[in-house]
Amino acid sequence: MTLILGLETSCDETAASVVENGVRVRSNVIATQHELHERYRGVVPEIASRAHLERLTPIVREALSQADSSWDELDAVAVGHRPGLIGSLLVGVSAAKAAAWALGKPIIGIDHVLAHLYAGQLEAPPVHYPAIGLVVSGGHTSLFEVQSPLDVTLLGKTIDDAVGEAFDKAATILEVGYPGGPAIDRIAREGNPNAHRFPIARLESDRLDFSFSGLKTALLYAVRGTPTGRRGEARFERSAGELTAQQRAHFAASFQAAAIKAVMRNLTRALDERPASTLLVGGGVSANSLLRAELDTLAGERGIDLRLPAPQFCVDNAAMIAGLAFERMRSGEVDDWSLAAQPASAVT
Ligand code: KG4
Ligand code: ZN
């Protein structure tokens, strides 16, 4: 039996988890910082790293206690060391190194994007490859060809905003709260997705790239009217506060329909062009109810195994970090003390 402690501090979740043999999640403790960033409508890096520093030790203790395991039983310590906010990553990497050093056990650095693709294997049967992978989060919107958990090739990604970021900005425009994805998802249920026609970018490229900034601007202008005045001091015709609940719901539903259609269109193309027996999905936006329904339908039509992780494995978590670390360890890939926090992913 191999027991790995995973740490995750790349953005605004402080998380620790103990995973057995890469798939059995013995504990999965997540502390979100949403309440700290809500008033700024986005993650403030300095606030995030300070909060990680305060919370990580109690979270790790809680993860070990829930897993009913002691430090001595651990075989390795894993940490999401890229991509993310550099200050936040540094907290996790430093803590993981200290723990691994003190225990005399290996340290394993994990790419957070690859970990999201691995999440569908947790508490689930083995995956058959090749697979197509989709990561949809606040920081990423990427499609991959996946030959194995550690062998992925990028097929396309967003050239501007990530889809989760677009949801968060849409929620700011509609003044419905933070984080925006869950709020838009909830409100959209009461609205008509055909009430407004929003643009879906078509990019002149052989790659399966995405763009969401035009959609966001279209929503802004539809809600508030065309701006006048100079840049930086634009004046709008209306404010979102003047919308009725029903109008707001129609905007949310129409925005969500366009955003999810953009994701599904490229995903369908990827599946048309490549053989795949499995569809791996990860990232916070995979909690979206419309996306989940569309993915279910697509996988049903094509007879492929859809790995849509349970909600606690969709959002940022450390179980996916510890799980993928088991794969790396099994392939003889461990890191040394030069492991560094890095802001960019190696695969996007
Ligand atoms: O993977 P994640 O927890 O963190 C990153 O790595 O970014 O994803 C967070 C993102 C946020 O943008 C949030 O608004 C979005 O996932 N999100 C959703 C939903 N739940 C979370 N977006 C759409 N619908 C949801 N139900
Ligand atoms: Zn993430």
Image: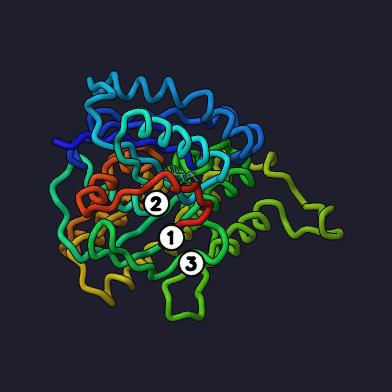
Q: CB of residue at label 1: within 8 Å of ligand 2? A: no
Image check: 32 left or right of 176? left
The C terminus appears in which quarter of the rendering?
bottom left
> Would residue 198 be seen by someone viewing this image from the given angle?
yes
Q: Which labelled disc corresponds to residue 111?
A: 2
The secondary element bearing badge 2 is classed as: strand
Res. 40 image quadrant: top right
Viewer-side residue, 145 vs 107: 107
Between 334 and 24, the one lying in front of the other is 334
Q: Are marks 2 and 1 in contact (CB under 8 Å)?
A: yes
Q: In percent of the image, x 62 and y 43: which residue is there?
A: 172
Distance from Cα at disc 2 to Cα at disc 3 = 22 Å
Label 1 and label 3: CA atoms lie apart by 19 Å
> Residue 332's spot in the image, x, y percent?
23, 52
Three-letter code, disc 1: Ala
Going by the numbered disc 3, the residue's amino acid type is Phe
The mark found on residue 346 in the picture is 1
Residue 153: percent from left, percent from top = 34, 68
State the SS at label 3.
Answer: loop
Q: Is there any visible trace of residue 250 in the rendered image? A: no
Identify residue for label 3: 210
Labels 1, 3: front one: 1
Inspect the image, locate mark 2, and give the three-letter code of the amino acid beneath it. Answer: Asp
Q: Give the crowd class for mark 2: few <14, some 14-19, many >=20 residues within 10 Å.
A: many
Residue 104 in the image: state x and y as whole percent: 31, 33
Give the mark, 2 or 3, whose residue is nearer the N terminus.
2
Question: Which one is closest to the eye, mark 2 or mark 3?
Answer: 2
Look at the numbered discs 2 and 3 and tell me whether their residues touch, using CB distance below 8 Å: no
Which quadrant is home to the N terminus? Answer: top left
Q: Is residue 216 above or below residue 10?
A: below
